[in-house]
């Protein structure tokens, strides 16, 4: 079921998403060679709790941490660990969710640790561009396929591929609400978007093929099948009469 948010709901959505944005900025300042992904998780959890919110991901279907830390060939849902230290040249996707006053916020960025290769740098840049292509011209009455169609066209124009097995989603009182928001598809197709809908748009772009596989041991970590690097960029956005309001920027 797709829920439309009232102005009252949106005030709370803005609070939740502002916390997510601030956590992403805090983590960005702490992404450095030698820092453990556990340390980043701890910083995020402490910030979220101090803000009076709860980490949306912690215990979600048993997920054991407050953020996801997804390095290089890990697409999403990498679990923070005391044993994993950031290394020069890594790219790391950080995904954050916060829940407060009955509503969730969700956002992700991919950061570069120190200096990386031009190839990985470009992947990170193009993935961010994919998000902005996806929301270009989006407003009340647009079609769901406008997002995926634009994201896919941009990614593929650079020789990259769009992950199919994971998608964006509606968000509000639940972290995952309808509709599913694929990063592939056809412009002009799919359901219409309406003012008051809040959706998390989150391109996951692979340098190689689009196939992914989930770690059998931890049940969470999603990697590219071919071992190629992958990047992730996500914002929660509100559809309005005139365009979109990005709640996590
Ligand atoms: N931000 C992720 C999403 O869009 C949520 C992480 S899943 C969790 O689906 F299980 F780790 F919480
Ligand atoms: Co999401």
Image (cartoon, helix red, strand yellow):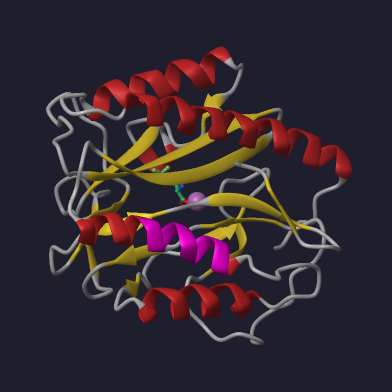
In this picture, is 200 found above or below 165?
above
Secondary structure mostly seen in the magenta stretch: helix
- Residue at x 28% of width, y 54% of height: 121
From the viewer's perspective, is 89 left or right of 247? left
In this picture, is 224 found above or below 222?
below
Nearest the eye: 217 or 136: 136
Nearest the eye: 188 or 249: 249
Locate residue 112, reporting x and y percent.
Answer: 28, 43
| Magenta residue check for 136 | no
Locate residue 177, reporting x and y percent.
Answer: 61, 56
In this picture, is 154 found above or below 109?
below
What stretch of residues is rendered in magenta?
125-133
Residue 215 in sight in this render: yes
Residue 223 in sight in this render: no
- Residue at x 46% of width, y 37% of height: 96
Quadrant in which the C terminus is drawn = top right
Locate residue 215, reporting x and y percent.
Answer: 18, 53
In this picture, is 110 found above or below 212?
above
| Magenta residue check for 127 | yes
Q: Residue 68's quadrant in the figure?
A: top left
Q: Residue 128's quadrant in the figure?
A: bottom left
Nearest the eye: 119 or 194: 119
From the viewer's perspective, is 247 left or right of 204? right
Locate residue 154, reporting x and y percent.
Answer: 45, 75
- Residue at x 43% of width, y 21% of height: 45
- Residue at x 59% of width, y 28% of height: 19
């Amino acid at each position: 079921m797709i829920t439309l948010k009232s102005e009252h709901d949106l005030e709370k959505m803005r609070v939740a998403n502002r916390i997510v944005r601030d956590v992403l900025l805090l983590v960005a300042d702490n992404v450095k060679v030698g820092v453990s992904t556990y340390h980043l998780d701890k910083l995020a959890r402490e910030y979220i709790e101090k803000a009076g919110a709860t980490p949306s991901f912690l215990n979600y279907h048993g997920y054991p941490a407050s953020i996801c830390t997804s390095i290089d060939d890990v697409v999403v849902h990498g679990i923070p660990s005391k044993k994993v230290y950031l290394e020069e040249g890594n790219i790391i996707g950080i995904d954050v969710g916060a829940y407060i006053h009955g509503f969730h916020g969700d956002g992700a960025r991919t950061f570069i640790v120190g200096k990386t290769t031009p190839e990985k740098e470009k992947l990170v840049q193009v993935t961010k561009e994919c998000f902005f292509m996806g929301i270009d011209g989006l407003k009340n009455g647009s079609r769901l396929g406008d997002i995926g169609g634009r994201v896919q066209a941009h990614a593929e124009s650079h020789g990259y591929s769009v992950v199919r097995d994971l998608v964006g989603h509606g968000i509000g009182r639940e972290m995952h609400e309808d509709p599913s928001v694929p990063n592939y598809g056809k412009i002009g197709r799919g359901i219409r978007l309406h003012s008051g809908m809040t959706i998390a748009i989150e391109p996951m772009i692979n340098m190689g093929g689009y196939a992914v596989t989930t770690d059998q041991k931890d049940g969470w970590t999603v990697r590219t099948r071919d071992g190629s690097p992958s990047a992730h960029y996500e914002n929660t956005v509100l559809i309005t009469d005139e365009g979109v309001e990005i709640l996590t920027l």
